């Protein structure tokens, strides 16, 4: 059975090659918006200004999920880009699509100068096959952090941020009772930090088959792990009036930067945006690593973000141009500019070490930003902390959130909500397995 991607790429392959031109034209579709969109466009402009052989056109074509659907449609007419930004949760789908040129094959085929060892391996794990070969080039990489009001914590009597969730429970109470915050935490159900990060840090599974890496027959097991108690804890905060619930991210961030709420959870990629917004209100803040359960030795946080995938159906000249763009992005100076402008951390070791040596993270405006990288490098990654590679994962995340919201309103218990979520999600996993019957993940 051919997938939509497979059928589309077969059609695209018979299109005539574009006539040779003095300057090779390539394009990239991406899904970042707001300030991050501006930084992507600036990066593309820097590449175009740095040389004259290649010109890249970078365009935002919707959200992460929208551009993936748009790319499928574009194959039918041969109007797909050479480079497609795909969110981490789409990795398995891309690997099985037969629509991409794996990154390691691109490098080997065209003799491109890429030092794979310079990429942080904990980041590359999300986009690598079972033999460690990269299928995509890591691009915007992040992890989850706690953003907190430093004056609020001082008023509550704290000189450092809690390391365990048990201590975090008490912090919420102290922010209310000692610091006078009616909103200790702006909160919503967020599976990236609540489920994925929590599970990785505690080395517990989200699904069987090493979270899907080892086979398409994976099944969700989140109703059988400490994740159940973790969500019961958070719903307890809600029932006790220790959080202000709002599913809209912008609203939660606004409550934090305006000083209404003392904390909220966000990606490190939100650092520069929070910096800009808080500068207008005068709120003093910084970031901390996500807590862990007492008695647990935490391992690495899970990387989040997206990678750049190279699509089939183009000429050698175009692929060499794509390779030149990737090499430019990996240059230490470009990585440093990207990290500074966005909040994402560098994906290469050299760029990160340069920033450390330059004292970048010791500057007052950048204090604690390096905690994001340190949390990724904490401990040795295991088969359960590399990532999650499940089919139909966008829909599965929606199902889990939907069922947990029923627990939030008191209609069901957390256990019952997750039991139902697992049952519904496993149906989708079997559909994905049937779609790719006879196939295995690389």
Image (cartoon, grey):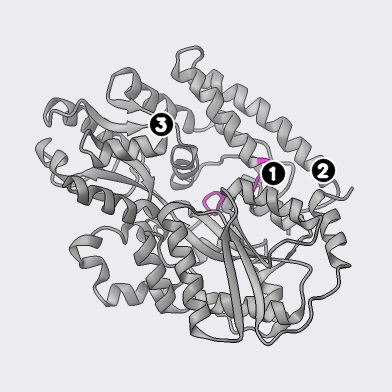
Residue position marked by numbered label 2 in the rendering: 435
In primary-sequence order, the first of circles 1 and 3 is 3
Residue position marked by numbered label 3 in the rendering: 188
Q: Please tell me which residue lies in front, 143 or 271.
A: 271
Residue 177, horizontal then vertical, whole percent: 14, 25
- Between circles 3 and 2, the one closer to the viewer is 3
In primary-sequence order, the first of circles 3 and 2 is 3
Residue position marked by numbered label 1 in the rendering: 391
Q: How many marks?
A: 3
Q: Which residues are magenta?
A: 384-392
Residue 292, horizontal then vertical, whole percent: 36, 42
In primary-sequence order, the first of circles 1 and 2 is 1
Q: Is residue 9 above or below residue 182?
A: below
Measured in 3D between alpha carbons, the distance from the residue under mark 1 to the one under mark 2, in whole angstroms, is 10 Å
Is residue 390 on the magenta stretch?
Answer: yes
- Residue drawn at x 34%, y 66% as measured from the top left: 340
**The C terminus sits in image quarter:** bottom right
């Amino acid at each position: 059975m051919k997938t939509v991607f497979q059928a589309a790429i077969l059609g695209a392959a018979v299109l005539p090659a574009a006539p040779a031109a003095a300057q090779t034209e390539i394009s990239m579709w991406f899904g970042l918006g707001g300030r991050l969109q501006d930084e992507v466009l600036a990066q593309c402009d820097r590449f175009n200004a740095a040389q004259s052989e290649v010109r890249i056109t970078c365009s935002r074509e919707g959200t992460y999920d929208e551009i993936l659907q748009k790319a499928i449609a574009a194959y039918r007419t041969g109007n797909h880009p050479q480079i497609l930004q795909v969110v981490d949760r789409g990795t398995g789908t891309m690997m099985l699509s037969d629509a991409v040129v794996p990154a390691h094959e691109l490098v080997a085929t065209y003799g491109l100068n890429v030092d794979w060892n310079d990429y942080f391996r904990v980041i590359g794990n999300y986009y690598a096959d079972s033999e460690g070969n990269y299928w995509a080039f890591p691009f915007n990489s992040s992890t989850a952090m706690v953003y907190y009001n430093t004056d609020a914590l001082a008023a509550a009597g704290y000189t450092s941020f809690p390391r365990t969730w048990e201590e975090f429970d008490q912090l919420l109470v102290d922010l209310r009772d000692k610091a006078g915050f009616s909103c200790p935490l702006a909160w919503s159900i967020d599976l990236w930090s609540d489920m994925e990060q929590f599970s990785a840090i505690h080395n517990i599974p989200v699904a069987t088959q090493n979270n899907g890496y080892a086979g398409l027959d994976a099944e969700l097991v989140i109703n059988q792990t400490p994740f159940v108690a973790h969500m019961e804890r958070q719903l307890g905060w809600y029932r006790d009036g220790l959080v202000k619930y709002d599913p809209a991210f912008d609203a939660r961030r606004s409550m934090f930067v305006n000083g209404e709420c003392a904390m909220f959870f966000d990606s490190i990629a939100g650092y520069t945006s929070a910096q800009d917004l808080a500068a207008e209100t005068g709120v003093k803040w910084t970031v901390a690593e996500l807590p862990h359960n007492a008695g647990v030795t935490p391992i690495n946080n899970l990387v989040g973000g997206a990678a750049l995938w190279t699509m089939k159906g183009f000429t050698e000249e175009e692929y060499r141009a794509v390779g030149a763009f990737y090499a430019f992005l990996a240059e230490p100076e470009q990585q440093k500019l990207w990290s500074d402008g966005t909040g994402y951390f560098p994906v290469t070791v050299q760029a990160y070490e340069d920033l450390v040596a330059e004292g970048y993270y010791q500057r007052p405006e950048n204090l604690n930003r390096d905690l994001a990288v340190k949390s990724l490098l904490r401990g040795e990654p295991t088969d359960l902390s590399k990532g999650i590679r499940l089919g139909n994962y966008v829909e599965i995340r929606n199902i889990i959130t939907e069922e947990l919201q029923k627990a939030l309103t008191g209609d069901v218990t957390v256990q019952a909500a997750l039991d139902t979520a697992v049952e519904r999600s496993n149906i989708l996993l079997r559909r994905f397995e049937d779609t790719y019957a006879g196939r295995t993940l690389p």
